[in-house]
Amino acid sequence: MTITLYDLPSKLAVKGWSPNPWKARLALNIKGLPYKTIWVELPDVERVCKDIGAKPTGTWRTGTPLYTLPIIHDDTNNAVISDSFEIARYLDDQYPDTIPMFPKGSHTLQAAFKEAHERVALVHLYPLMGVTMVRQLNAPSEHYYRTKKGPSSGATFEEVDLKGEARVEQWKKVREGHEIIASWFSKNEEGQFVMGKDVSFADTMLVAWLRVVGLIYGEESDEWKAVLSWQDGWWARYLKQFDQYLAVV
Amino acid sequence: MTITLYDLPSKLAVKGWSPNPWKARLALNIKGLPYKTIWVELPDVERVCKDIGAKPTGTWRTGTPLYTLPIIHDDTNNAVISDSFEIARYLDDQYPDTIPMFPKGSHTLQAAFKEAHERVALVHLYPLMGVTMVRQLNAPSEHYYRTKKGPSSGATFEEVDLKGEARVEQWKKVREGHEIIASWFSKNEEGQFVMGKDVSFADTMLVAWLRVVGLIYGEESDEWKAVLSWQDGWWARYLKQFDQYLAVV
């Protein structure tokens, strides 16, 4: 059995910089499944997807198919799966003796969790990420990202980058969003994973995004230190549970 | 064992018009627990809560304690519980042989589901409900609702009621929100409850709100017929599963 994870590289020491591939990697690491990574620069994604028979995961605004990573190829049954949610579901089905990402009955709730995470926190985080993220990319990906995924206004990432008080206010919204999320955890009866004692895919949604914040700003940055200080270190304690699952292979 | 549910009455034949008490009633009905209802007009809620020793569930903008229904009083151990989520949790704990509202590990996910439901659908629904809702209330509650819960601008419910194209657009947003919710259900492996084959508290969140729409507009209204037609009748089929749990006693 060989699983291949297709991921997006960067200039960072760990290479991985994109949240969705991080979710798939976390799922593989949590499940303890052996795999190798193939790194694909952004301008090559569509060609690679077509080469291996991966389906598009959406459409561009123009209506043409949109190909995204992560993808896994599992040569056990020559399966090619796109989209981190579907990858985790596939791994649950194919490897039932590993830790389940979707404990029984939780698929719909975890899809709703993704939406809630997006609406309370990520929408506020996106405007803070653009220019910092794009500067970590290798030249081909940086050029692609700037020309294809730049602000819809046509401005550059630098031009729309929030500064001064606007930036402080934006980070405040991200923190408030994470406080809301942490309040959901207070409903747990036991354990500090989303599903209590059991890790699940919903955890990878939170960890992947925070991991990317730590990586692109840097572990010693004020931004990352602030995240770890939120709510008397609650998020630092939460993230600590995943130290063992962060390997990039 | 006698459980008493404190709920808000109206001029409607079934009396109950408020979504949160409906969640608690649905939980009691699904669990098959015997209970009786005490109806409390809005201006009497605070006094009744204090009389029975119920805790406030929040604060008014002024900082004074806010008392809300539903509340249950369970004379088995003289317990008084406020807030529909906490009521459902209490009933799970106290009556472990009944259908659980929070299957193992689902507390945090269901809290996130509540937030997602609010943000994708309810925020769009609220502006459509005000004047229709307030007109169903008995005089003391109507007066209280108009003076204490009116639009923050100080206008009347009638003055802010959306009309014409603005109203059509608002209903479109509600429908789109429900389409997003239904898309989460498409992740289910089996069954058409939020947690697949097993009903849970998250279902009562959806059913309570839609039930209130049906009640205050009327089962024969264009609004309710539209809801039942959304997505080729998907919501009609979903709601059909709860017909057996709608009794008001």
Image (tube, coloured by chain):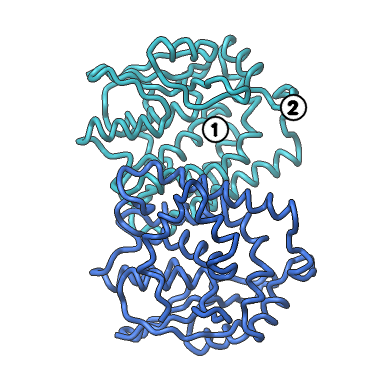
Chain colours: A cyan, B blue
- B127 lies above or below B165: below
Task: Report if the CB atoms under discs 1 and 2 are less than 8 Å apart.
Answer: no
Q: CA distance from mark 1 to mark 2?
A: 24 Å
Which residue occupies 40% across, 18% down? Answer: A54
Left or right, residue A158 beside residue B46: right
Q: Amino acid at mark 2?
A: Ser
Give A180 or B208, whichever is nearer the viewer.
Answer: B208
Residue A213 has which mark?
A: 1
Residue A71 has which mark?
A: none
Which residue occupies 49% across, 14% down? Answer: A45
Q: Position of residue B229 (x, y in %)?
A: 51, 52
Q: Residues within 10 Å of mark 2 (few under 14, many from 20)?
A: few
Image quadrant in which you'd find residue B72 = bottom left
Q: Position of residue A79 (x, y in %)?
A: 30, 21
Precedes in sequence: disc 1 or disc 2: 2
Residue A153 has which mark?
A: 2
Front position among marks 1 and 2: 2
Q: Position of residue B24 (x, y in %)?
A: 43, 71
Q: Quadrant of the N terminus of chain A?
A: top left
Image quadrant in which you'd find residue A226 = top right
Q: Amino acid at mark 1?
A: Val
Q: Position of residue A112 (x, y in %)?
A: 46, 47
Q: Residues within 10 Å of mark 1 (few under 14, many from 20)?
A: many
Residue B226 can be seen, yes or no: yes
- A32 lies above or below A53: below
Element under disc 1: helix
